[in-house]
Image (tube, rainbow, N blue to C red):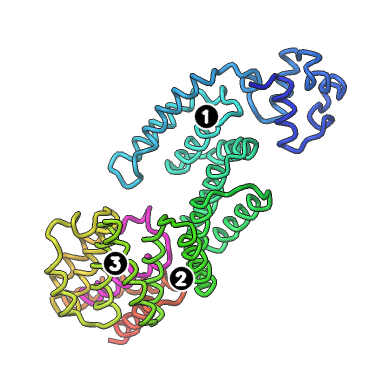
């Protein structure tokens, strides 16, 4: 491990501070130089001043917290962090993680363990909607930068973009993502293929979100070519799903069939049940939303496995299943049954932020408004469609948005 003076010099240079700036008005530049070169030991008062100037704790400079102790803490924190955000006890796990790390915040050093603990702590604070999450995230980014740990540094850059994405500020999210990616790429450091593909996928998703579909497709085609060249299957299912939905919305029949075929081949090759389930959903979705063939959609739905986990293994997809059931029943005039299905299509709003997903659910709400109207609940139907029409107005143009507009016009003219 480096000496106290070496740690101070490294932190000062990482923060692009001069000797004079770090010395401030409480110590001399000459004394600071002696300390950095291990020719003098700072007093506790000077050490505290230096730590404050560097925005770290004095104990971090002294490395009072042993690396082994931090490793043990990290192992415990990773267990809580491994709980998926869609799991029932996700909130409790993140709160336990925060409670575990918080007493040790003053002991964080400049090694990987500290960086990872700070990152998880900041992410968990944000998830719990607590203030102060930015500082530990920024400190973690500085540590990863100094240690050239690119995958974790990239993950923080993508997290910063996703914060704006979850707030539905898609333009800002794209701006932050491109800025973070550029900052890493300009250092001309080796970026692992999977990290590059993570960046590519997020960039394509955000480009779609702001309506730049051609640019999104170009990023996707480049990423797929890169994956083939490097014999990688990372994000392959995600790419083909995104491309399939885009081609379906754009009316690109040949492209739609091409990407559906590739997704099916991938699902069979990788034994990816989730991808296979998505294809089953996509078949019904096309019939309901793009062909208005609700009878065929309902027949296919009846062929789905009764076990919804077997139909779509990702719990996040269950609302999509119920949504398609409701749309098919509504289109067949079975409005009371449709309303019961729509009640099961509860949107997990904390996880759905992309305009395409939001628009799909808003289209479902338009169907629900029609069923409410048909069952005599005209006031409730009008309130719903007016609310949906207002919410979807800020999203990019899609066939789903067109459907909302049609129902809004129809119900308001009756």
Say if 234 sits above or below 35 in the image: below
Q: Which residue is mark 2?
A: 395
Q: Is 109 left or right of 358, judged from the image as shown?
A: right
Q: Nearer the viewer, residue 17 or 303?
A: 303
Magenta span has 358? Answer: yes
Eye-nearest disc, 3 or 2: 3
Region rendered in magenta: 347-372
Give the structural element (helix, strand or loop) at label 1: helix
Element class at badge 3: helix
Tag 2 and tag 1, C-beta contact below 8 Å? no
Check disc 2 and report its element: helix, strand or loop. Answer: loop
Q: CA distance from mark 3 to mark 1?
A: 41 Å
Q: Residue at x 47, y 71 (%)?
A: 394
Residue on which disc 1 sits: 113
Disc 3: CA contacts within 10 A as few (<14), some (14-19) or many (>=20):
some
Instruction: Using a 10 Å C-alpha cutoff, classify the residue at mark 1 as few (fewer than 14 neighbours), some (14 to 19) or many (20 or more).
Output: many
């Amino acid at each position: 491990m480096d000496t106290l003076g070496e740690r101070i010099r490294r932190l000062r240079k990482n923060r692009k501070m001069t000797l004079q700036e770090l010395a401030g008005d409480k110590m001399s530049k000459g004394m600071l130089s002696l300390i950095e070169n291990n020719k003098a030991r700072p007093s506790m008062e000077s050490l505290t001043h230096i730590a404050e100037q560097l925005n770290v704790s004095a104990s971090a400079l002294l490395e009072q917290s042993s690396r082994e102790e931090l490793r043990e803490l990290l192992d415990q924190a990773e267990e809580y962090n491994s709980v998926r955000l869609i799991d029932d006890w996700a909130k409790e796990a993140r709160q336990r993680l925060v409670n575990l790390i918080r007493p040790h915040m003053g002991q964080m050093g400049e090694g990987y363990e500290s960086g990872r603990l700070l990152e998880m702590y900041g992410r968990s604070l944000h998830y719990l909607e607590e203030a102060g999450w930015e500082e530990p995230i920024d400190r973690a980014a500085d540590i990863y930068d100094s240690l050239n740990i690119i995958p974790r540094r990239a993950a923080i850059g993508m997290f910063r973009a996703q914060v704006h994405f979850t707030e539905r500020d898609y333009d800002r999210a794209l701006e932050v993502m491109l800025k973070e990616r550029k900052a890493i790429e300009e250092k001309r450091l080796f970026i692992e293929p999977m990290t590059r593909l993570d960046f590519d996928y997020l960039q394509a998703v955000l480009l779609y979100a702001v309506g730049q579909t051609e640019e999104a497709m170009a990023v996707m085609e480049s990423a797929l070519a890169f994956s083939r060249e490097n014999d990688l299957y990372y994000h392959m299912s995600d790419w083909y799903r995104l491309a399939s939905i885009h081609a379906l919305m754009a009316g690109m029949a040949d492209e739609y069939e091409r990407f559906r075929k590739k997704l099916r081949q991938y699902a069979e090759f990788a034994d990816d049940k989730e991808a296979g389930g998505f294809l089953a959903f996509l078949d019904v979705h096309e019939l309901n939303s793009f062909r208005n063939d609700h009878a065929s959609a309902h027949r296919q739905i009846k062929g789905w496995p009764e076990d919804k986990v077997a139909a779509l293994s990702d719990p996040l997809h269950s609302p999509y299943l119920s949504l398609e059931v409701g749309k098919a029943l509504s289109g067949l005039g079975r409005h009371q049954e449709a309303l019961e299905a729509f009640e099961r299509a509860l949107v997990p709003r904390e996880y759905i932020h992309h305009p395409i997903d939001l628009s799909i659910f808003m289209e479902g709400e338009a169907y629900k408004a029609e069923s409410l109207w048909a069952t005599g609940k005209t006031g409730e139907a009008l309130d719903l469609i007016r609310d949906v029409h207002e919410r979807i107005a800020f999203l990019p143009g899609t066939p789903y948005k067109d459907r909302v507009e049609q129902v809004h016009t129809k119900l308001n003219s009756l």
